Amino acid sequence: MKIPSLILKQMYTLGSLENAEDGVRFSLKNRLSNATLTRLTEVRIDGQAVPLERLTLEMDGDRVLGSAIGPTKAVAFPLAKVMKVHAQTDQLPKGQHEISIAFETTPFGSLSFKVKDAIAERVKRTTVPHDKDNDYTPEIIKARQKFVEEYTGIKLQHIDKFSFDPEVTKGNIENFTGVAQVPIGFAGPLEVNGEHAQGEFLVPLATAEGTLVASYNRGMKVLNLSGGVTCTVVGDCMQRAPVFVFDNARDGRDFVKWVDANIDKIREEAEGTSSIAKLLYIDRYLANKLVFLRFNFSTGDAAGQNMVGRATFAACSWILENHANIRHFYLESNFATDKKASQINIMRTRGKRVTAEATIPRDVLIQHMRVDPETLAYHANIANVGAFLSGANNNGCHSPNGITAMFIATGQDVANVSESSAGVVYTEVTQAGDLYISITIPSLIVATYGGGTGLATQRECLELLGCYGKGKVHKLAEIVAGVVLAGEISLAAAISSLDWVSSHEQYGRNR
Amino acid sequence: MKIPSLILKQMYTLGSLENAEDGVRFSLKNRLSNATLTRLTEVRIDGQAVPLERLTLEMDGDRVLGSAIGPTKAVAFPLAKVMKVHAQTDQLPKGQHEISIAFETTPFGSLSFKVKDAIAERVKRTTVPHDKDNDYTPEIIKARQKFVEEYTGIKLQHIDKFSFDPEVTKGNIENFTGVAQVPIGFAGPLEVNGEHAQGEFLVPLATAEGTLVASYNRGMKVLNLSGGVTCTVVGDCMQRAPVFVFDNARDGRDFVKWVDANIDKIREEAEGTSSIAKLLYIDRYLANKLVFLRFNFSTGDAAGQNMVGRATFAACSWILENHANIRHFYLESNFATDKKASQINIMRTRGKRVTAEATIPRDVLIQHMRVDPETLAYHANIANVGAFLSGANNNGCHSPNGITAMFIATGQDVANVSESSAGVVYTEVTQAGDLYISITIPSLIVATYGGGTGLATQRECLELLGCYGKGKVHKLAEIVAGVVLAGEISLAAAISSLDWVSSHEQYGRNR
Amino acid sequence: MKIPSLILKQMYTLGSLENAEDGVRFSLKNRLSNATLTRLTEVRIDGQAVPLERLTLEMDGDRVLGSAIGPTKAVAFPLAKVMKVHAQTDQLPKGQHEISIAFETTPFGSLSFKVKDAIAERVKRTTVPHDKDNDYTPEIIKARQKFVEEYTGIKLQHIDKFSFDPEVTKGNIENFTGVAQVPIGFAGPLEVNGEHAQGEFLVPLATAEGTLVASYNRGMKVLNLSGGVTCTVVGDCMQRAPVFVFDNARDGRDFVKWVDANIDKIREEAEGTSSIAKLLYIDRYLANKLVFLRFNFSTGDAAGQNMVGRATFAACSWILENHANIRHFYLESNFATDKKASQINIMRTRGKRVTAEATIPRDVLIQHMRVDPETLAYHANIANVGAFLSGANNNGCHSPNGITAMFIATGQDVANVSESSAGVVYTEVTQAGDLYISITIPSLIVATYGGGTGLATQRECLELLGCYGKGKVHKLAEIVAGVVLAGEISLAAAISSLDWVSSHEQYGRNR
Amino acid sequence: MKIPSLILKQMYTLGSLENAEDGVRFSLKNRLSNATLTRLTEVRIDGQAVPLERLTLEMDGDRVLGSAIGPTKAVAFPLAKVMKVHAQTDQLPKGQHEISIAFETTPFGSLSFKVKDAIAERVKRTTVPHDKDNDYTPEIIKARQKFVEEYTGIKLQHIDKFSFDPEVTKGNIENFTGVAQVPIGFAGPLEVNGEHAQGEFLVPLATAEGTLVASYNRGMKVLNLSGGVTCTVVGDCMQRAPVFVFDNARDGRDFVKWVDANIDKIREEAEGTSSIAKLLYIDRYLANKLVFLRFNFSTGDAAGQNMVGRATFAACSWILENHANIRHFYLESNFATDKKASQINIMRTRGKRVTAEATIPRDVLIQHMRVDPETLAYHANIANVGAFLSGANNNGCHSPNGITAMFIATGQDVANVSESSAGVVYTEVTQAGDLYISITIPSLIVATYGGGTGLATQRECLELLGCYGKGKVHKLAEIVAGVVLAGEISLAAAISSLDWVSSHEQYGRNR
């Protein structure tokens, strides 16, 4: 199997070049595929060969001399592992240096490539205290709090108060120092007729926006009086979208055919990285000499961005290894579109695509919201023109309000409000004079497992909703959608009946 | 001054129709302008006149018989005030009823209008405990916690722990029951060369996303080594966008001319509602028989959505009173575009338009980010194609990550991540081979006063940044932008140098 | 097979209700499927039964009495055919009437439905002369010319001059009266390295825009000096996108699964309408209770909008017949998106997706365009920001100029400039200092057969390009793309080198 | 007045460097402002000074020796004029050369700059015959026709037939060789209630799309029966959008303030280039270190793109001359957005913003279109969702069909269908059960003067509409909008009543 050197260079990356006491160190990372080193042929630094006996390779703590490696003393070099190389040479001056390396492997045969890396300059700077061994002990946290107080001259009184063991934040945050305490109010209960969420739910909303809880609560009352809100997850997928650069468009188009022909193998590689992620399909977008592949996965109860990143990277590693004429490759180029509002998310789903709908009896709407169905629908028709002209990603009222408040409460990645802010509202006055109203959230990104869902208050809120852990993510998506529809009804009624400003005046804090 | 009855109906709204012990009560709200009632001419319920002596009007606790009102016993009825009317009549059955009312006023002369309102049906439902007098006492909060526990069967262990007096949440949340504790880590210090923020800032990031703090920290190091990040607020305005419906497009177009001719008076009305809000200009968008006016205000250190809503409403009240042929009016119709990502926000600013920029010396980039300027710029060029094809609101990497983490920490309205997620990244390799990189956040909505900024941990974080209170909002906007650029450099370098997945693997919690 | 009456009503449409001399006439169109009438059970007009012996059915000129139809005298009623019904009754007054009809069929059994139709009011109005038998004779054309002259008082001197037999316009236009004479200039020859277009092509451009031909010619010279332009069709599909309305989102989602399960049958129905159209795949977009199915077809050498409309309609007829709970159906609802610029066209192709690319040697660019590759690429980078902020469907310079001029010359549907105006330009300075530049036209709608391609000058221009008739459409797409790239280079160079206004001044007609 | 050399280089451009018999020639164009040369100080070619007495300057045929120029023999060098310079030196080799030039001027004082230009390589290529003196004579046209025939081997039979004197095409096309004959059919008359178009108009439609004329005709009948169509121009402006690059965002923001402070002078410079163009206002869009100024002009009866380009360039010349720290400048960067569909055009108008509207009586709609208002409005509501999801620039049916057919007939720049394809449709069922329907075309680009409007058939069609020449452009815009609404009603009714495919089948040419 012949591997072009460009790809090779990308697949074995050098890093951490640094001067050590007795020479130079650098590391070599295998991004290609499992391999076994059967011989180290040559290592050159700035063109100068380093004798093999002055080279030491270290993998997982085991060391071997460069000259000792051979068919009978092969070194396993698995995918994603880092091999540290130590060369007993003169120290290198600051700046960039070229290292070339050649070796023999099973099953890839002879490989060689050159890489430029730089000796990092040690820079002294003030940094937040950090404990390499365990950064989540009370001691180091206290040290950081003290550092913050000294650096800013402000005595901490609140962010240093929290109710949980900081160990739980490992994997969720670095430099943990304390917490933001965001007020939670409860709205509801809301009656949800989902496929997964069935019954009444008391909804925790973490927010600092006056009137928000009251407004959602008002909408929930109306939904309950209408027999509850019907919620359905109609789509579910998470994406990573690498880009491949070719010499020309023709090569790019042919590459897509090749991907189609090799989809089974690509799926196998992708799914080999996780017991959860399943590759659903790959969308392809061609422009110029670029091919964007948008991998769509199901990700169980996790939001899945990281899972999907790893799976796509594994698939791409196989692709790069097996397709000859890729000139450049990047794991992402704004087609995912992670942490962005985008037309592709609205159209083709990111996370959950979920619809909440209800038919509000005419009398209920008039009595409780002081607006009749025709007036509300009339306003919705006008608001469609507004959304169309302004290029908005949402033709409804304010779905991100409820989404954000639930995201903070339940430990979602709140930055995903970027995608989750999209909404499609549709209303009809029925033959009977009632109001059919629905919202589809096309890119709602939620999880009940992983990410921040295991944190203390976050997990507690999920438990209050009966949504913590595996097999619960569609239930949570349905509840969020139902809550969102409550808010839409409440604000749409307020705007179309003119009560809107006054509700802010009554509850909100005004200046 | 002649007031069309449609407008009149909108301007005096009836509400709260209910049966009382000895008759019927309803209220009348003046949305028009200060007025004085000099005679009550007639009140009819379902066509049936109510004798004036059986009517009692109550304003601010003072009562007067309907038959007693006269030029010598006039009743002041100021704008936005509610007058309660009590009619000693038979109780009304459930459902809708028509009330007509006629009176004489100074300075508007004789006014009469009909309104339909409904007797609200009393519905028994489970509700979250609420104390009408003071809903922020320890007792009622405890009652709510107990209710939540009983309703869900979950014992609260975390959300009921907070470090502040709950009174402080008044105006920020209803049904306050506890808090979400969101982990805070500190990144930096970051050197900012702003017009308002000058010096180094230690940045609190509230997040549950592993690697986020580390990634921003890495970018900050690079920015510091480049002499800091230059930040500039280039635009600042907050909007409310009412829509006016006319008989036809021609009336709409002429209305816009009329608005231009009356802009001074409109400004006066708008600015009369606040000592802070200043009307900058009114954008106008015409389609069909609709006219969308997008009012642009400066709002001091508040985000200003409510302030601007009130000011616009006051201006519109005057407009409705003084322009003859408006057929419908709504205070909002998706042109603001509040809590939405939109092209108009990207183009024409919402909140602060702020740019962060830096020139990263070639060596700094290579040594600390393991990528050269050409490679990073090459990827940015490709990512522009990706953003263009996918219809994204951001051609950069992940600005909402930093924005959201700072929003939660500092008490911003986090739902505004919808707007604030937009970003415009531009890179150049300079003649000297360095990397110029910048991001403009066109609709960053931040406040240092009002909203959630006064809450306990939120205020503390603002104080740590030297950004609490008046005169600080541009400083905060600059810091946010600088932090965002740090994150862009960090992730762009990781993607273009392929380190990206691995940084997640090292720090993040994987499944 | 049970057919719900709503669908039935849609599938057999009544039309042309009118009073005749001796009763009432109306027609019945079969939109369902081939059927045979084995008995006419009942016909009622406004509730009043019409005796079967007073009913006459007429199909293709054959008549049969209503009472005569029976198993032994069955009447074939094929799909899409119209049966005329004549009822000897009293004439009906103006306005709407309800007709109910019941019959027995093979294979559908008993069918009955009610329809409201209106007696059309005869309105006298001035109309353009029309000859029902043959509207393309010299006589009727002359009559129309005379009518135009008399109606407007203008003597025709030019539009009545044409070089072809007007019969050729049959199927292309109604009320044919003359021609627009649009000037044609030739640019080129242009060397194209396509898969279908290979060699040099002289390009007819029909335009009235001064400098256009000269500007494209200039770009062609540069492309030729660069070894020609490489052109590749990377996508090819034409769409029709019906919408189905359900009771709720859940039914909609389940419908999509049903479509997937029945895709073979749906394909068979769709492809049964044409020997050319092949169903490639069906995209599905769910929102609220709506399901948009976007049918993607290959259409040979025709643009294919009509072909695809018929095929989709046939498929939908089968769907409506076989899926129980569709509430409404429309053959189109802005998802096609025919005659529109749209993000979906840019992303997912409409017509041909074609890329033209070239590497312009540095010296060629400097000598002939007076700009160096870096300057042009610098401007392109800035223009990307402009396109992003303004929400444009094209980040290049002016591709619609060349496209439109070729569309008019070669008989394309020029209104498709709406879709075809989109473009994705990507530039790079190569390692060697040359300029790689390319454009992808994601939704280029062209034909070499059908539509206007058979008209006199239009066919002649296609023949000049060697592109008339079957098997030529990809060749034409490649040539168009190559021409477009010539124009991009020419204008991009002019803008980035500042020559732009002056070229207009030199050639263009200025005021 | 100090002029930075970068700007200076841009403002005096060198061009046409070529070897002559006795030396080297190049030209110098003044893009700055009127100036007078009072001394030629120095000219160097590739660093080598050329003796002033070996230099000859030629302006408008007058020659002067370089050494002779002086205060008493000053040479006027007006804006936009080209001075030819002849240096008696050795001939230059192929490739790039550097020329430096220094001179003294009134009023700018000493100026000097360097420019690189290349000796153009003479390339022999096949070219279309061209006559430098008069390219529109019968002889050269005949020569071109012969060339086309010989080059392609196709005998011309149609494109060489036209009814006009080819001289009329001067300024409209280069290499004029013949015409495309596009069939014209007439629809109407249509009753228009405009402010400028009043009465009935017979509408010429140039198209090859079967059913188009019939469909528009059908809609016109309905509009006439509804009392005609009301049309109003609600906006009118044409843009050019230069971009200015600064060192940083702060300089960019301050530049905008400077522009505001100097708006009167900028307007004067802009308006000095034309008796027609009036600068309405300048929109500004800031991102990164870029400032996009979008100049908005009124342009009388011309479409105005060229006029506006010149005016903006003149304004920018003054800006560049007077603002110190502009680093780069381009006259266009995708913010105009010429020949593009864009959100900014939809929002903020390009060309005419025109609305057509009508209330169709219920009976008229049912009788003539076989659909009731509710059904049509129901479909429109769904189509809004379709347009929103697909990211279309038009939520209506097919406005570009009518627009394109009128554009070809009346000599508009048909490539502007790109912009003109946008449409905003709004429908309501009125209280009386009638259908209010309207369309706003936000960026309709039309002219009744200049461009192709003076061509033979094109002018004739304008005259048939009473729209040729000055003071007619709003009339034409109104008629186009009225025609467009006819088409919207016709197709919307067909889709919502299901007649749609069949009308294509009846008239259109099917395969």
Image: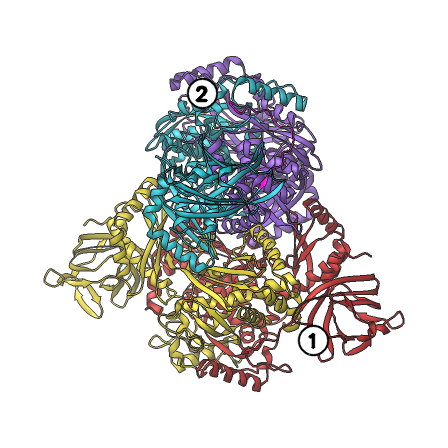
Chain colours: A cyan, B purple, C yellow, D red
Q: Is residue A126 magenta?
A: yes
Mark 1 chain: D
Q: Which quadrant would residue A503 be assigned to in this image?
A: top right
Asked which secondary structure carries label 1, the reply is strand
Name which residue lies at 55% across and 83% down.
Answer: D141
Name which residue lies at 53% across and 53% down.
Answer: B288
Using residue B63 as the reference point, say whether residue A304 is left or right of it.
left
| Rendered position, A422 above or below D212 | above
Which quadrant: the N terminus of chain B? top right
Q: Which residue lies furthest to the top in this view?
A: B139
In the image, what residue type sits under mark 1?
Answer: Asn
CA distance for labels 1 and 2 = 91 Å
Q: Would residue B243 be seen by someone viewing this image from the given angle?
A: yes
Of the numbered discs in the image, which one, if any, rests on residue B128? 2
Q: Which quadrant would residue B478 be assigned to in this image?
A: top right
Name which residue lies at 33% across and 52% down.
Answer: A261
Q: Which of C211 and D263 is in front in this view?
A: C211
In the image, what residue type sits under mark 2?
Answer: Val
Q: Residue furthest bottom?
A: D139
- For label 1, the residue is D19
Magenta range is A118-134
